[in-house]
Image (cartoon, helix red, strand yellow):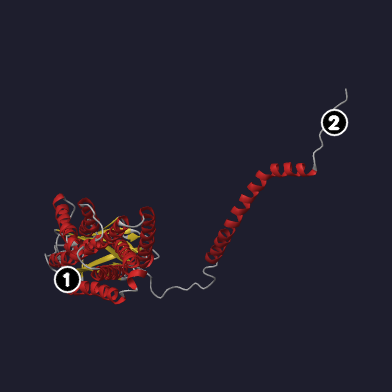
Amino acid sequence: MSARPDPVKSPDSAAAGEQSEAGPDREKMSRQNLVVLLLTPIVLLAAVIALFVYTGGAGLNVQPAAPQEAIQFENTVLRPGVIELHVRNTSAREVTISQVSVNDAIWPFTISPDPQIGRLGTAVLTLDYHWVEGEPYTVTLFSANAIAFSTEVGAATTTSTPSPATLLSFTLIGVYVGILPIILGMLWLPAVRRLGRRAMLLLMAATVGLLIYLGIDTFTEAIDQAAALDGPIQGFGIIGIGLVGTVLLLEAISRRQLALNGGGARRGMTLATLIAVGIGLHNLGEGLAIGAAFRTGVAALGAFLVIGFIIQNLTEGLGIVVPLVRDRPSLRALATLGLIGGAPAILGTWIGGLSASPILAVLFLSIGSGALFQVAYQIGRNLVWRADEGKRMPMTAFAGALAGMLVLYITGLFIK
């Protein structure tokens, strides 16, 4: 019986086998090479930084003419016989607090956790000072390098503290400012349904003008508050993150909802929801302003703001229901839209009245402005300056947008 010869492998099949065996090794080496390529610039950059530090700034060794120190006042709390300051070191190096004066008189103090505040560190200064209700005070801190940092108390009064009664009061203010006027403004829906096509376009354009004006107003308020957040806190950077992030997020949400819901009634409800969200974020900023006014003792200003915002928010309720004129939304859906637009005012009064966080204030205001601009763009693109509307009645759209802005400007003459 003859022996069966061994099968002879072809060169191609042998090469294929070698490649399959080498495949995992090559993939592993490829990943290692990718990691090396990604890490190489970082390692070289670290070496450059180390060289710069080792050579003392390339041998320049330039010292500033005066110490670069900065202190940010985050909160001032007044209790009977006590002034409490919450501060943060926003300079590049540590700062040591050595003296405190009240109305130009040096006053003893205690500081916790330590007089030496590290970079971005916080401290609480406590002064046993018998302040007088309604009187103004200027408190000045002096560092060990004799650099002064001042804050003012416009009208001294006991700072609100969290309690059931205080929370209830601020909740009622939020209801008066946000929820009630918006729901009352939404009651115009049956009357708006009887308007003609030109009048409808005028109202929609007025809604766009209203939202743009509110966005500008909120944005400028964010800029004013961000100006106090200098140094590493980067107040204007917070504005950029809040505004741009909100615009992109709402754009993504609107595109997704419109793609899922299609046109018709769902489209109108989507736009109305976006308007309510934008107005709600704006009302969050209004609540911050009102709560801060009451917290700092400017009660008359707080009451004036409440009345002014009640008048202004009536027109915001109209803006929410404009996209729904051709629909038949349920009372539950309308109530939900009213809560979305108005309830954030309650949260704003809580934050502004019971705490003082400049960072959160700037963030919320920038989020509100971004939401308002994005919603104004959505309404303008989908309901006002469409190909079948804007070309036929361009002057009507222009007049409506300008009228919406003028209404809020005139309202502002009485509340600002």
Tag 1 residue: 415
* Frontmost residue, 377 versus 237: 377
Residue 403 location, quadrant: bottom left
Residue 333 shows in the view: yes
Residue type highlighted by circle 1: Ile
Instruction: Give the Cα separation between the discs numbered 2 and 1.
Output: 103 Å
Dot 2 alpha-carbon crowd within 10 angstroms: few under 14, some 14 to 19, many 20 or more: few
Which amino acid type corresponds to the residue marked 2 in the rendered image? Pro
Determine the residue positioned at 85% across, 31% down: 5
Residue 410 locus on image (x, y percent): 19, 74
| Picture layout, residue 32 above or below residue 314 | above
Q: Tell me the residue that label 2 is attached to.
A: 5
Placement of 197 over or under 39, stated as above or below? below
Circle on res. 203: none
| Residue 278 rendering spot, x and y as whole percentages | 29, 61
Look at the picture and state if 163 lies above or below 233. above
Crowd band around label 1 with a 10 angstrom C-alpha radius: few (<14), some (14–19), many (20+):
some
Whether residue 28 sits left or right of residue 255 in the image: it is right
Q: Quadrant of the C terminus?
A: bottom left
Q: Quadrant of residue 394?
A: bottom left
Q: Secondary structure at mark 1?
A: helix
Residue in the image at 20% along x and 64% along y: 192
| Residue 273 image offset from top left, x and y in percent | 29, 57
User: Which one is closest to the eye, mark 2 or mark 1?
Assistant: 2
Discs 2, 1 touching: Cβ within 8 Å: no
User: Based on the displayed image, in which of its 4 quarters is residue 182 positioned?
Assistant: bottom left
Location of the N terminus by quadrant is: top right
Q: Report the number of numbered marks.
A: 2
Does any portion of residue 145 appear in the rendered image? no
As drawn, the residue found furthest toward the top would be: 1
Q: Secondary structure at mark 2?
A: loop
Vertical relation: 36 (above or below) 374: above
